[in-house]
Amino acid sequence: MPLSPEQQAEIDAQRATPRQTLRAVSDGMERHLYRALPVLDHGFVRVIDYMGDDAAIVQAARVSYGAGTKHVSNDEGLIRYLMRHWHSTPFEMCEIKLHVKLPVFVARQWIRHRTANVNEYSARYSILDREFYIPAPDALAAQSTVNNQGRGAVLQGEEAERVLAMLKSDAAQMYDHYEAMLSDEGQQGLARELARMNLPMNIYTQWYWKTDLHNLFHFLRLRADEHAQYEIRVYADAIAAAVADWVPLAWKAFSDYRVGGVTLSAAAVDCLKRRLAGEVVTQANSGMSAREWREFEGEWG
């Protein structure tokens, strides 16, 4: 189960005791606060805390003391201008703290985004639960034949059953040995900080992850992309749903300029101009490498 009874009781208690505040509040984010959104088979994402909203971005850009007499349309225009021209510090005025439960191998991808504060569940002090990520049948795919870091066709029939059986049996055996090494039945047992090294990469860990909106957008642009690994993409999608409610104006600008927009090299811009002028442009006279040309043709051919 994604949440333990203790965690669910804590969430229920937190949402049952609202408090008055003078701080900026996002009604959209308040609906998400503390609630756990299930991800994968045992994971979840939940918002623990946040700071700021769309108005905080605008306020920082104008260095003012309040909303003043500006209208929402002015705020939206300014936020879009900031996003369009790659301004970053106004978006850093908003922060979010998440509680995430995720498989260790996903955490090792995630931690590469170093612009955050992280505190992870410690297997030096505590014993990890017997919970492993086992892919659903439609997520069990072969190695791609064209992309060294991607997936190909979904495994079928006996091959899928064989792989699933190995994943389940290996995880169970390694956890059995983990427990046995910790056993104190007449023996001292191995230290937790050493016994954990025998656990599989698909075991679940948990952490608190705090970052600002600028760096969160960078995370989402990479990890919510359709080419990202499925197991981290579903976490990014869950976070994105909360962010869209938290800062709707900033999210719309981000969706337009970062997610839906296209970045072109100087050579690509030159090629488009020449094509619009009626010139025949090929890879030989484009100034692009073969790979750049393939990508350009795939987008604009």
Image (cartoon, rainbow, N blue to C red):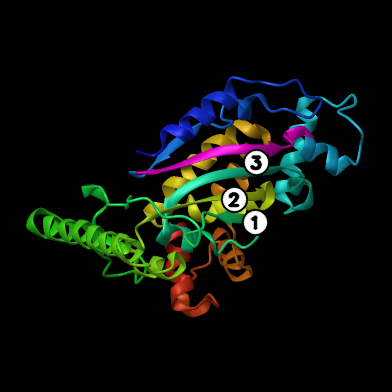
Q: Secondary structure at mark 3?
A: helix
- Residue 247 figure quarter: top right
| Circles 1 and 2: CB atoms closer than 8 Å | yes
Q: Is residue 8 left or right of residue 22?
A: left
Residue 104's place in the image compared with 4, above or below, is: below
Q: Residue at x 37, y 52 (%)?
A: 230
Crowd around label 2: few <14 · some 14–19 · many ≥20 (10 Å): some
Q: Is residue 257 left or right of residue 78?
A: left
Q: Secondary structure at mark 2?
A: strand
Q: What x and y, as percent, mark residue 189?
A: 36, 67
Is 139 in the magenta?
no
The segment highlighted magenta reads 42-55
Q: How many marks?
A: 3
What residue is disc 1 on? 116
Crowd around label 1: few <14 · some 14–19 · many ≥20 (10 Å): some
Q: Residue at x 74, y 49 (%)?
A: 92
Residue type at mark 1?
Ala
Q: What x and y, as percent, mark residue 19?
A: 71, 21
Asked whether residue 96 appears in the rendered view, the answer is: yes
What residue is disc 3 on? 253
Q: Which numbered dot is residue 209?
A: 2
